[in-house]
Amino acid sequence: MIWKRYEALKWASSFLKSYKRDDNIGEILLCDRLGLTRTDLLANIREPLPDADAVWLKERVTEHALKGTPVQYMIGQAPFYGRRFKVTPDVLIPRPETEELVYRVGVWAGRFFGTGSRLSVCDIGTGSGAIAVTLALEHDGWQMTAVDVSAKALSVAEENAAALGAPVTFRLGSLLEPLEGRPFDVLVSNPPYVSRPEMRELSDTVKDYEPHLALFGGEDGLDFYRRILQALPSVFGHKPYFLLAFEIGASQGRAVESLVKQVFPDRIEDLAVEKDLSGRDRNVMAVIRIN
């Protein structure tokens, strides 16, 4: 019996719901398998689905339902800021919330440095390179440098930069160490920020598959913010201001804001905890006076 596309999606949705999984996973998988956009898939929803594609879909849907394997790792890519990025189990899967960090960096940079300014920007803990590559492509005048402690993650990031034509310099090392003495105007980072108690509460799709190196931020989840802030003066540039942009956990806004105030008590030009589209604290943005 040959399924039509809508029949395959109906089965996938029902099967996924029975295991309390996202029932849209079947649609994502089928679009990738057939090389179609969601619009094209739905426009021709009554087309027959070849047996080989039906078998492939059943296998992937069953694996996700039973084991929690992330669909992005199955298909080897994830969307971010309107582009497709290669992802492997060596890197975190880019999240939609992180797109808001990228957007805010552009807004704050325009406010304090002027629109179209040539800036030197570093991305700490780049992972797949989604942040660095996107900023390089969205802002022609920015010189991007990206750092990661994982050689395997850096390899994925380099592939994404090459595939998307983004001029990014990559450095292997821990946090700011590879950049000490080099002048920058902006630092952006989505560091590991999951606390030990939160690690135990993560869903299996994250805890069992995504790299713990990129997730665990110490007992309270704040270790990497402390380390970055302490090392920050080693990369201060020559402009009057330095822009700092963090992604944070939903309960960490005031704590990270407090850390910034402790390290730079008399040099803060502007400081804000910004919420994501769901109304949760998601970014800490700070402008530090250099002179």
Image (tube, rainbow, N blue to C red):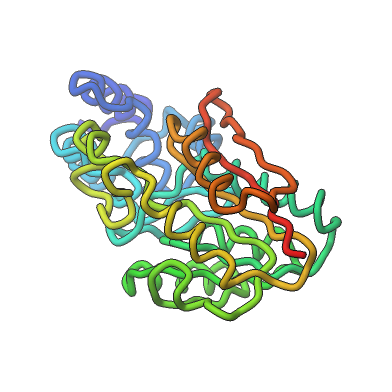
In this view, 28 is above or below 114: above
- Kindly indicate the quadrant of the structure image that contains residue 4: top left
Q: Measuring 59% from the left and 71% from the top, which residue is drawn there?
A: 235
Report whether 52 appears left or right of 143: left
Q: Of all residues shown, which one is farthest toward the front? A: 266
Q: Nearer the viewer, residue 234 or 128?
A: 234
Report whether 1 appears left or right of 73: left
Is residue 57 at all visible to an observer of this figure? Answer: no
In this view, 39 is above or below 69: above
Q: Quadrant of the C terminus?
A: bottom right
Q: Nearer the viewer, residue 250 or 115?
A: 250
In this view, 103 is above or below 172: above
Q: Measuring 49% from the left and 67% from the top, which residue is drawn there?
A: 160
Residue 252 locus on image (x, y percent): 45, 35
Residue 234 locus on image (x, y percent): 56, 72
In this view, 256 is above or below 165: above
Report whether 227 appears left or right of 189: left
Q: Quadrant of the N terminus?
A: top left
Q: Measuring 45% from the left and 52% from the top, which residue is drawn there?
A: 225
Residue 199 locus on image (x, y percent): 24, 39
Report whether 140 appears left or right of 274: right
- Kindly indicate the quadrant of the structure image that contains residue 167: bottom right
Q: How many marks?
A: 0
Is residue 282 at all visible to an observer of this figure? Answer: yes
Residue 149 locus on image (x, y percent): 36, 69
Q: Nearer the viewer, residue 266 or 198?
A: 266
Q: Of all residues shown, which one is farthest toward the bottom? A: 181
